[in-house]
Amino acid sequence: MSADPTTVLAFETDCHIFSGCGFPAPGLHSFLFEPIIGDADSNIYFNKTMLLALLGTVIIVGFFWAAFRKPKVVPGKLQMVAETGYDFVRRGIVYEIIGKKDGEKYVPLMVSLFFFVWMMNLWSIIPLAQFPVTSIIAYPAALALIVYVIWMSLTFKTHGFVGGFKNLTGYDKSLGAVLPMVMVIEFFSNVLVRPFTHAVRLFANMFAGHTLLLLFTIASWYLLNGIGIAYAGVSFVMVLVMTVFELFIQAVQAYVFVLLACSFIQGALAKHH
């Protein structure tokens, strides 16, 4: 029996080594989902990733609403967890990068970004969902675009048009003859490269992590036949190892995304360059 790797999934029980079935390796098809509602040709299109993004938003909003709707001086367990998370972003990222005075107004935005990105990443290891929303480039790109618009708006609002241009190009008369070259490099770096890498860094890590999890998960099932059972055990151990590693990477990527967002805003607000 032969199998088309674009259609065989890990739960298809007839696909094992030595059964005439080729290994159904994960690929781009692993990131494509049929619409739950509508189709590609209609005005309504709603698929699994959209559902997970919507559910994630509801979970985050519901969690903080439940934690803070009736705040207490002596917090309960839920309020304590929410306060710890909020304070981690506020003090550990925003205050450290932007500063307490200028950064306070951006704390709600950064807390929202952090927990939204983290939740979208966490879907990767949650049963039934098992897919990181941020491995679809549209979602990191949309979040990076929000940060980019705020960054550019603050740059020109704070420094004016000329000052904002100098801010983005790293203008410094002391550079002498190399100033024009530095300005060109800095302009392309700030206006094009940094927002691009801001989105791609998150997307690429989640894409790669999910692909590795799929690879070892499918391999565990595929090898579960005859002498391959011994190798299936090793592959399953790797699934567990990669899951724990993914938990770490998911949190780190949320942290890095917000850290970079704060650094952009700090640069826009900085008085001296």
Image (cartoon, helix red, strand yellow):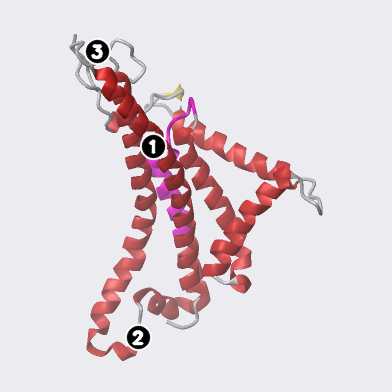
Q: Is residue 147 magenta?
A: yes
Question: Quick check: 226 left or right of 135?
Answer: left
Say if mark 1 contacts mark 3, CB within 8 Å. no
For the residue pair 82 and 42, the one nearer the viewer reads as 82
Q: Would residue 104 be seen by someone viewing this image from the given angle?
A: yes
For image coordinates 27% across by 13% down, the residue present is: 225
Say if mark 2 contacts mark 3, CB within 8 Å. no
Residue at mark 1: 241
Residue at mark 3: 226
Q: Earlier in the sequence, mark 2 or mark 1?
A: 2
Tell me the element at label 2.
Answer: loop
Q: Which label lies toward us, 2 or 3?
A: 3
Q: Quadrant of the N terminus?
A: top left
Q: CA distance from mark 2 to mark 3?
A: 69 Å
Q: CA distance from mark 2 to mark 1?
A: 49 Å
Q: Is residue 164 magenta?
A: no
In the displayed structure, 264 sits above or below 206; it is: below
Instruction: Answer few, some or many: residues within 10 Å of disc 3's Cα (few below 14, many 20 plus, some between 14 and 19).
Output: few
Residue at mark 2: 172
At label 2, the amino acid type is Asp
Magenta segment, which residues?
A: 127-149
Instruction: Answer few, some or many: residues within 10 Å of disc 1's Cα (few below 14, many 20 plus, some between 14 and 19).
Output: few
Which corner quadrant of the image does residue 19 belong to? top left
In the displayed structure, 16 sits above or below 247; it is: above
For the residue pair 72 and 50, the one nearer the viewer reads as 72
For the residue pair 91 and 115, the one nearer the viewer reads as 91
Q: Earlier in the sequence, mark 2 or mark 3?
A: 2
At label 3, the amino acid type is Gly
At label 1, the amino acid type is Val
For image coordinates 43% across by 54% down, the residue present is: 144
